[in-house]
Amino acid sequence: MTTNWQFAWRNIWRNKRRTILTMCAIGFGASLIVFSVGLQLGQYDLMISGSTRIYQGLVQVQKKGYLDEARMRNSIADAQTLANNIRKTTAINDVAVRANGFALVSSRERTYGVAVIGVETRHEGNVSIIPGLVKEGRYLANDNASEVVIGRSLAKNLKITLGDELTILGSGRDGSIAATIFPVVGIFDSGSRELDRGLVQIPLNSFQQVFSMGNHAHAVVIYHQNAELVDTLKTQLQPLLKAADPDLLALGWDQIQPGIKESIELDYSSGWFMYIVLVAIITFSIMNTFLMSVLERTREFGIMLALGFKPINIGKLVMMEALILTLFALIAGTLIGLAVNYYFLINGLTFEGMEEIAAQYNMPATITPQISIESTLLGPAVILIFTLLAALYPAMKIRKLEPVEAMRHI
Amino acid sequence: MNHVVQCEKVTKIFEQGLIKVNALTDVDLAIEKAEFICLSGPSGSGKSTLLNMIGGLDTPTSGEVYIDGEEIDELNKSELADLRLHKIGFVFQAYNLIPVLSAQENIEMVMQMQGVSKKERNEKSSAILEEVGLQGMEKRIPPELSGGQQQRVAVARAIVSRPSLVLADEPTANLDSVTANKLIDLMLQMNEIHKTTFIISTHDPMIMQRSKKLVKLHDGRIIDIT
Amino acid sequence: MNSFLLIFSLAWRNLWRNKRRTLVILLAIVLGVWAMIVTAAFMRGMIFQMLEDTVDNLAGHVQIHHSQYLDDPVINNSFDPDSHTISRITHDPRVLMWSDRIRLPAVVLSERETTGITMLGVNPARESKISFIGKSVVEGRFLNSSSDTGIVIGQALADKLETRLGKRIVLMSQDINNEIADRGFRIVGIYDAPLDPTEKAFVFVGKETAAKMVGLKGAISEIVLRLHDTDMVTPLVTEMDQLDHTIDVMSWLEVEPYLELMIQMMDTSMFIWYLIVFLAMAFGIINTLLMAVFERTREFGLFQALGQKPRFILFQVWLEAILMIIVGLLAGNFLSWISVMATGDGIDVSVFARGMEMINMSNIIPFVITFNDLMIANITVAVLGMLTGLYPAWRASRLVPADAITRI
Ligand SMILES: Nc1ncnc2c1ncn2[C@@H]1O[C@H](COP(=O)(O)OP(=O)(O)O)[C@@H](O)[C@H]1O
Ligand SMILES: [Mg+2]
């Protein structure tokens, strides 16, 4: 067996230039795909962690139907007890209750319609970046405080500053009028247009009073930095939710923000369309090498057949040659791709215009590639399959070889 | 100097790594117009090397080669190419023809490079094909011709533009004796009719007999001229 | 001339000498050219669709606002549509059509739900020509006149508010005196827009009705223009923006600044893609041509023996490479044309509907082949291909004649 591998190895190097060019083609494809898949996956990680970290959390518990139509009545009873149970059973502390409403908020001069969110002041900071981004004043003091924090853009539109009073006017859970006047104690700046101009936060208990919610709320937000845990977490929550209320659902980030998931899928599939096309081009590019290295040795194979080799053995030899050549090129290419990924992992990758586009999706302006099994091995595996298929064709031709005819071949 | 070819102390040493091969040593040779010379000697005696020197395909390590009084060592690549194009015709042992061109196109190719008009080319190539006995095969490509026919096309191509010199390196080596004889007949005939100088290398005694002048080579030296 | 014909026929015949090998490498080239053209067409189509959607989606080509409006979109930041400046703009020969609007943030209340929207008070005749609304009302009717007292809302909003055609809803907004003004409207029409967020964000009412509700007298918040030709947008905007400093004139690209950026990024990333695809084929082109050269070593020796200059051999092999690339380009362009024709209106990406919504796009992406993209792809392959072919050609011309003939 070893001699066979040796034999194949020597055969590869009979035509150095050709072998090196072929290896370059394969290695080029491998390093390119390893690099750009790593980059893509890294970018998706950013999109996901951005969307979960900023505000939405990794998993949310909501009442069935609330996700599609956020109706005030569709609420979770005794949400804080549920949240405490979740903290206890899952050992995850980053859990917070939210109640969501819609109201007209007015300063002395201006009125806008915004989302009003009731938050657990002690826990909100664990599931969202907003409390940490209060740039003027402070965050809400406690769950019973009568105060409000608002986004910077909204403050500007309302022509309002710290300490000014904000009138909140909406309708409560039971349809009654919900109205109150709270002083602005903090102004946050999250960088997200949507949040900064469309959202105000008040303490949960105050919310429940103003909007006649009793002990109800609309969501229990759970954050964990590892987005891959989403399904585990959901199953873990199942018994707890069933016990509390059979109509409760645990929703993953991909269900809460299907747009992000689908735009990732769209991007990934169009990426793979391009990679497959590229691999196909490379395959055709190197197919001639495989073909020639077999055809030009027809005479030699004739002699081998005459010496008693079986066509299948020669076919195997040819496949071994292709395999060795491809593997070496793939290993080299993958290492190069990994090295580039590693470089950008340390230094970050950014390019012109990146900032503007990133802001559109609440993303930082530097991408760090992901280095994982998927990003490292998927591309090379696809190339391996394609090249071995390309090598199969000439290997199959050997089966039809007749020794006498082959030896007469020049 | 009315010699077509003149070699003075031509020496060729091939160096392959540490091994030096003296392929030719101090060869002096003068050939006149319309001569029909046979270069004989065993395999490895330096026949091909000498013909390559004379044809300007290779340059001697020392010594001079003159073609029509012109020292070819002094010519650059492009001038050498022109010399071959206009003054020398070649016939090799095998693979003489361009496989993608038909018999007629192979013959016309040299004239085409010389810039001969299409009409003249057609006339000349048809005439020469008839002379070498290949009328009706004009459109055949080399794989469709037998070995003897291919060599005839090669001879036709070598003489069609009336060179002063035709160099044939073992032109009959791949042919059976009947075909070989016919090819020599053809070359002798061309030599008579067109007064073209022929230098033919061979180790076939039958051909040596038929030549007008025999130059014997051994280990890179001329040992006899008869 | 003679020699050229000879070189040409030699190159062409040699190209087809080993048909299988040539076809394999041609497949690589054709696939590469196809990939270049089709991806560019897809990207171009995506951007084209985005621009179309933006324009259709109420933005028009050019927008005119009060200079303070974008910072502070309230009723007070309105302007007089009959002023000298405005009529000069609307009467400019480059303008195809225009529509004037009262545009205000408002809150809508149904019997069951409350939500924030943008209220558009429009002149129905003008508005229906300029934006998607003209062909999007799927239930009931669009507004009859500027003083129509009905309201037209989006399908998605109707669902969210749990209301339907014929029901009443209440709009609340800030009036001219900073007081909250409200008014009930009967839903006379429901529209279906390409994107859900549009349906949830905009409601249409009569301009006069809206003016009465918030106490505006004659003033409006915005005018959108559509021009005859998009190339006129930038000159017109630059010219008109200087007329009056209380008026802000801006182009659609300023409304969606990242669109312009995407167009620029697309050009660069497409070119990088072209280079990558080309490199993938280049290895194959070089290898195949080198094989063809080395197995014809004898022939090149023969050519030289017959008196051909090395230059001639270089051109012969180079021409072979060029012919190969030309054939590949022709077939690749043809294949791209066929596949673009075969997809008709474009490709349906509705599997990713919500992903597309995130980047403000509808679900059908048309293939748009522009002359420029076509030229760049073809020229890239042609120029780089010719350079690539030069190497094997140079190798062929450097073969030493004596060696080439004697060594089989
Ligand atoms: N290119 C070369 N490199 C090295 N040695 C060569 C080369 N060409 C010929 N020789 C050597 O020169 C000698 C003469 O060869 P050649 O002229 O081909 O002989 P002939 O044609 O008479 O058989 C031989 O020993 C041969 O091995
Ligand atoms: Mg010899």
Image (tube, rainbow, N blue to C red):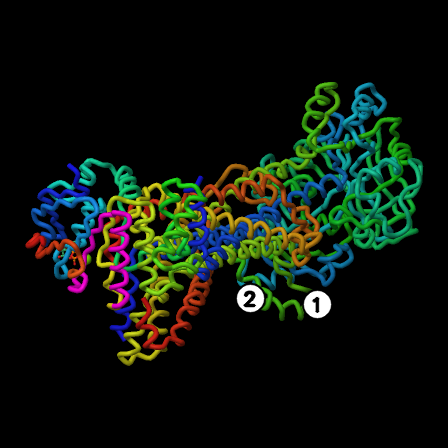
| Image quadrant in which the N terminus of chain C is located | top left
The magenta-colored residue range is B178-207
In the displayed structure, would residue C64 be above or below residue A11?
Answer: above
Q: Residue at x 42, y 54 (%)?
A: C14
CA separation, marks 1 and 2?
Answer: 20 Å
Crowding at mark 2 (Cα within 10 Å: few <14, some 14-19, many 20+): few
Name the amino acid type tagged 1: Asp
Could you say whether the residue bearing mark 2 is in a helix, strand or loop? helix
Q: Residue A245's mark?
A: 1
Q: Position of residue B112 (x, y in %)?
A: 39, 44
Horizontal relation, residue C388 to residue A131: left or right: left
Mark toward the viewer: 1 or 2: 2
Q: Is any atom of residue A336 visible in this view? A: no
Q: Residue at x 21, y 47 (%)?
A: B34
Horizontal relation, residue A231 to residue C194: left or right: left
Horizontal relation, residue B222 to residue C360: left or right: left
Where on the picture, by quarter, is residue A388?
bottom left
| Image quadrant in which the C terminus of chain C is located | bottom left
Quadrant of the image where one finds ligand 2: bottom left
Q: Nearer the viewer, residue A175 or A362?
A: A362
The residue carrying mark 1 has its beta carbon less than 8 Å from ligand 1: no
Q: Is residue B192 magenta?
A: yes
Q: Is residue B221 magenta?
A: no
Name the amino acid type tagged 2: Thr
Q: Position of residue A190 (x, y in %)?
A: 60, 41
Q: Residue A232's mark?
A: 2
Q: Earlier in the sequence, mark 1 or mark 2?
A: 2
Q: Dot 2 falls on which chain? A: A
